[in-house]
Image (cartoon, grey):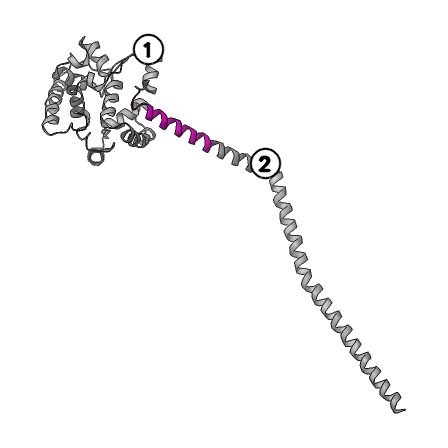
Amino acid sequence: MAQGAGATHRGGKAARSTRRGATAAAGGMAKRSASAAPRVGKAASARGGGARRAARRTGPIGWLLGRLRRLVAMVFRVALLAAVVLLLAIGAMRWIDPPGGPYMWGEAWRLGGVAYRPISLDAIGLDAARAAVAAEDARFCTHAGIDWTAVHSAIEDYRQTGRLRGASTITQQTAKNVFLWHGRTMVRKALEVPFAGVIELIWGKRRILEVYLNVAEFDEGVFGIDAAARHYYGVPAQALLPLQTARLMTLLPSPKTRHPRALDSRLERRARQIAAGAQTVVSQDLDSCIR
């Protein structure tokens, strides 16, 4: 009987141990199931977000965004290619005479042709070069394309008088005549700055002045000082007398309304000032960059 009672007791303990194991196992499974539920929910949510993104990519919004990205990429590539081509063209013009410019082409179309015969600075002569510096840009050899002193002076004059006068350097005027258009617009003035910097860097001062004297307008359809000398005086540029050269320089602000042999008293005084200024350019060594 004692043995039977012991066996019964051991059997009860074993049964209770088995039940506790089963309960613990069931609890563990329940916990694992509970912890797995959020992961399943997160995975389903991720799949849902991916589906929404895929829908956006394939729907009208996705199509529009794709087209916009392609358009931006194409504009960037075209702009980069245009910049490279322009830089190569500017580099080539260091040695090759420019084929005019937008304004000259417009005048050629309007008039049926223009007088344009570019020649070297040696053929033009230093007298004309010095007269241009005296008339248009006395600090030509010392600035880097923009004369900030003249810009500040023009701003002060505008504040005091309300009138805006030009402060363009020979470099800026060359950039305008060769690459840009005429007209007083802020867009064009803003574009002059990078062009002026580039041609200062690539061409150098002597080449800039050479191109300027070849593309400047001296009368309707007459471009360049050599064409102007032949047009007004019947001689090449190098044969001009100093006062004749100075009179031609007085035409530059308004070439279609002035004639070098019919200047009023004010412009005649201006011509004589330019002739004297050309001598000052020599005496003060302001032509060191073009000799």
Q: Amino acid at mark 1?
A: Leu
Q: Amino acid at mark 2?
A: Trp
Residue 164 on image: x %, y %: 24, 30
Left or right of 98 in this view: 34? right
Q: For the magenta stretch, what is the residue range?
A: 75-95
Q: Secondary structure at mark 1?
A: helix
Query: In this orientation, does residue 181 appear?
Result: no
The mark that comes first in sequence, 1 or 2, is 2
Residue 91 on image: x %, y %: 33, 26
Please give the residue where the numbered disc 1 appears in the rendered image. Answer: 111
- Is the residue marked by circle 1 packed among few (<14), some (14-19), or many (20+) residues within 10 Å? few
| Mark number, residue 158 | none
- The quadrant holding residue 96 is top left
The residue under the point 19% across, 18% down is: 122
Kindly report the distance in space between the C-alpha atoms of the residues bearing marks 1 and 2. Answer: 50 Å
- The quadrant holding residue 119 is top left
The residue under the point 83% across, 84% down is: 10
Is residue 130 placed above or below 117 in the rendered structure? below
Residue 6 on image: x %, y %: 85, 88
The residue under the point 22% across, 14% down is: 226
In the image, farthest residue toward the top = 234
Please give the residue where the numbered disc 2 appears in the rendered image. Answer: 63
Foreground pick, 278 / 136: 278
Q: Is residue 88 magenta?
A: yes
